Image (tube, helix red, strand yellow):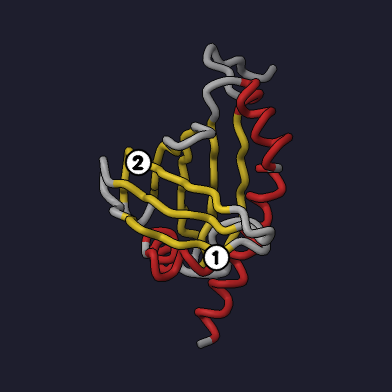
Amino acid sequence: MPQQRNDDTANRELIITRLLKAPRELVWEVWTDPEHIKHWWGPNGFTNTIFTMDVKPGGEWDFIMHGPDGTDYKNKSVYVEVDPPGKLVFDHVSGPKFRVTVTFEEQDDQTLLTWHMLFPTKEEFEQVVKVFKADEGQQQNVMKLETYLSALLKS
């Protein structure tokens, strides 16, 4: 019988897992270094301008995602937990609001990435998926991360 959680979050969360063919330390580095993340972050066709990326509890990540249609999307997050090279937690404090928890689990010379987005309400989650296609965007983001890691490992 499945366990019921009192704080059931299934209707307001997005979880993506992927086994990346890269060592955990490298995956951590491309997630926490603005010189790396600017090259792969965001859905297909998006680019980034990163103003601040202070990866420590209370530190801010302030950037603009530039959409392929020329629209700029300002983003600001605040790091809640930073546990290198295993876990990152940050709150996206500009709209829409959500918490991201990313874990990096070492599996031989690969990394099991688990990317969890938790929204305050079911309605906000549904709005972000419907309007911004967050589910598709996150899948594209992970594919871009895989491509970027592959290119780094070949160079």
Label 1 residue SS: helix
Q: Residues within 10 Å of mark 2 (few under 14, many from 20)?
A: many
Q: Between disc 2 and disc 1, whose residue precedes? A: 1
Q: Which mark is residue 40?
A: 1
Who's the residue at 53% across and 55% down the image? 65
Of 134 and 151, nearer the camera is 134
- Does residue 111 appear in the picture of this structure? yes
- Identify the residue at horizontal 58%, vertical 18% (top origin): 8
**Label 2 with label 1: CB-CB less than 8 Å:** no
Residue closer to the observer: 75 or 43: 75
The one of 8 and 76 positioned closer to us in this rendering: 76
Query: Which residue ends up furthest to the top in the rendered image?
Result: 6
Compared across the picture, whether 54 is left or right of 114 comes to: left
Q: Residue at x 57, y 58 (%)?
A: 66
Q: Nearer the viewer, residue 144 or 63?
A: 63
* Residue type, label 1: Trp
Looking at the rendered structure, the kind of residue marked 2 is: Val
Question: Label 1 neighbourhood size at 10 Å, few (<14), some (14-19), many (20+)?
Answer: many
x%, y% of residue 23?
Answer: 46, 68
- Residue 36 figure quarter: bottom left
Residue 88 has which mark?
none
**Residue farthest along the front direction in this orientation:** 70
Say above or below: 92 vs 149.
above
Q: Against 147, is 14 above or below?
A: above
Q: Which residue is mark 2?
A: 78
Distance from label 2 to label 1 (Cα)?
20 Å
